[in-house]
Image (cartoon, grey):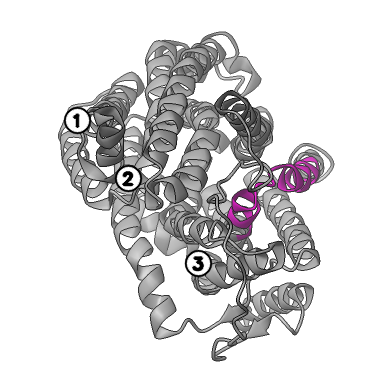
Amino acid sequence: FITIDITMKLNTLLSIFVAAVGPGVVAPFAAPQVRPSIARPRPSATKTLFSTRQNEPTSAGDDDAASKRGMLKFAIPALGIYLMNPLLSNIDNAFVGRTVGAAGLAALSPATLCIDQALYMFSFLSRATTGLASRAYADGGDEIDSKQRLSDAASPAFSVALFCGLVLSLTYTLRASNVLNLLRVDQQLFQSAAKYIQFRGISSWAALSQSILLALFMVSKDAVTPLKIISLAAAANVVGDWFLCSWPLRLGCAGAAAATSLATFISSAMMVYSLRKRHMMPRIKMPTKAEFYELLGFTGPLLAITITRMAGFVNMQKTALRLGTDSLAGYQLVANLNTFFLLFGEPLSQLAQTKLPSLIDSNQTKEAFDTFKSLMLISLFAAAGVGVAAGCTAFFAPGLFSSSLAVQTVSKSTAPVLCLSVAATVVAIAVDGSMMASKDFSWMLGLGLSSFFVQSMLLSHCSSVQAIFWTFTLRLASYAVLSVARALLGYGHLGRAIRRKRGH
């Protein structure tokens, strides 16, 4: 009866989501609609991400200034979007740490591992959507055609994300204890962790689908609308944390998870409404054979790459589980700070993924080189500032997240390596976006596997939280340095474009 009741609840949530999307969008197992082709004059200039009016003569200096203004206008609100989720995770940690204590904070570590790492494993879908949709959106034509191509390009990934999300929700709702048993979680933490997984897991289908919708906003050069939506949902999350964790219900970990799920449903519904209004909402449909192979061309390599990275995070978590409750709680605190600050590099990755593909595909080598150089310079400055901010937060402000002196001591001792870890990761994220834009998947996978095995060997000798983060720093720094060196030497799609430019 419990299984039937939970399944009915999930079906009801899906029905609400489908109702919000509208009957015209849902087309399961439908053949793709064929629109009559209309001959249109092709624009003389390729439409890039931040281009101004087409065919309008401008000087090189004006184009460069407009491009930098466009990058800044896009990056600042995009930064707010990517910082929101880790910020809320740290707010959840603060509520749980202050109301439940070190045991509750330690219970969040395996629980968030199960939820967040599974969602991260499927992040290849949103990345594939960015690659496919950005190329479709920059393919010329009028605005109506561009929106239609954007929607069509995202529909297969959106449908797959919705299906995989429903499977995750059912697994977490019905089999949370089995998942925790695989991690050999301490029985003192088991009940709190299981409740968190169940309440967070029920919204996994909405969270995974939302990542596809967010990619469409980014590709269409609109970072302001999703920032407003996610900010409103974040406010609802904080209010929910107060009522469910602190007062009056005091539900602890379960309350924090319920507040997060509620915020996820709110933001997902608002994104659906906004995209429908703009005629950009992807359809729910069975992908055709051609669409499946096109999606597989991105998702296959990206899935393998994502799994190697996720396996590294899992190994770090499993190493922390051996260190005791206080060290585990300290690891959870520092890991969330690391996640929060490293996302300062995510807007740079999005810029690379949305701007570089059209430049590389159309052989605009000078523009590709200049864009890559600008991204690298910005990432270096950002890495220095963000790394210092992360280290200072871990050293001077751990009391905001935990009242335990032992947990605060772990945080302070890890501050120096956290500073370097965040700095290396910010640069690596910008590099990673450039590699994905140029579809250098074999290089990314090969280097990822090599660094994974090296990190795994090093983790087997780690006996402290600081040592765990040293392995992470080494992995990300080596990825960034070797990838940039490869591009500058003229290897890979991006490297060949840079070499041609330098050859002029």
> Dots 2 and 3: beta carbons under 8 Å?
no
Most common SS among magenta residues? helix
User: Which disc, if any, is residue 489?
Assistant: 1
Of the numbered discs 2 and 1, the one sitting upstream in the chain is: 2
Q: Which range is magenta?
A: 213-236
User: Image height check: is 51 above or below 462?
Assistant: below
Residue 500 visible in the picture: yes
The three-letter code of the residue at mark 3 reads Leu
Q: In the image, 503: left or right of 100? A: left
Give how far across and how far down residue 148 sits, in percent.
64, 70
Q: Which residue is mark 3?
A: 168
Q: Which residue is mark 2?
A: 309
Give how far across and how far down residue 96 sits, in percent.
64, 35
Give how far across and how far down residue 202 sits, in percent.
62, 64
Residue 222 among magenta residues: yes
Q: Residues within 10 Å of mark 3 (few under 14, many from 20)?
A: many
